[in-house]
Amino acid sequence: MNRLKEVLDEKGIKQIWLAEKLGKSYNMVNGYAKNRRQPSLKLLNRIAEILNIDVKELIVSSPIQY
């Protein structure tokens, strides 16, 4: 699961701006922000680079379920 929406809100950045920077559609970025979709690791690293944060700040660990 990712924290993209929280990080964008904290930084005052709009999803449309991030979509333009990534060359992706708003709907794609909105899907990431609402955790309906998960970006690839490569894209997650690119998002962290654009937002000038460590990629770890975008990731929330989920408990292991057996």
Image (cartoon, rainbow, N blue to C red):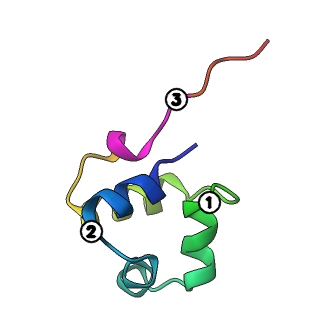
Which residue is found at the position 45% from the left and 41% from the top? 59
Q: Nearer the viewer, mark 1 or mark 2?
A: 1
Question: Which label's residue is closer to the chain start, 3 or 2?
Answer: 2
Is residue 1 or residue 23 the one in the foreground? 1
Q: Residue furthest top?
A: 66
Which residue is found at the position 52% from the left and 29% from the top? 61
| Residue 52 located left or right of residue 26 | left
Query: Quarter-wise, where is residue 50 in the image?
Result: bottom left
Q: Write the start and end of the magenta stretch as one range.
A: 56-61
Question: Mark 3: which amino acid?
Answer: Ser
Q: Secondary structure at mark 2?
A: helix
Q: Which residue is mark 2?
A: 50
Residues at circles 3 and 2 in contact by the CB criterion of under 8 Å:
no
Question: Mark 2: which amino acid?
Answer: Ile
Residue 45 in the image: state x and y as whole percent: 37, 56
Question: Could you tell me how far apart the alpha carbons at marks 3 and 1 are, in whole angstroms?
Answer: 16 Å
Question: Could you tell me how far apart the alpha carbons at marks 3 and 2 are, in whole angstroms?
Answer: 22 Å
Query: Quarter-wise, where is residue 48 in the image?
Result: bottom left
The C terminus appears in which quarter of the rendering?
top right
Residue 29 in the image: state x and y as whole percent: 54, 72
Q: Is residue 19 above or below residue 29?
A: below
Question: Which label's residue is closer to the chain start, 3 or 1?
Answer: 1
Q: Is residue 2 above or below residue 29?
A: above
Q: Which residue is mark 3?
A: 61
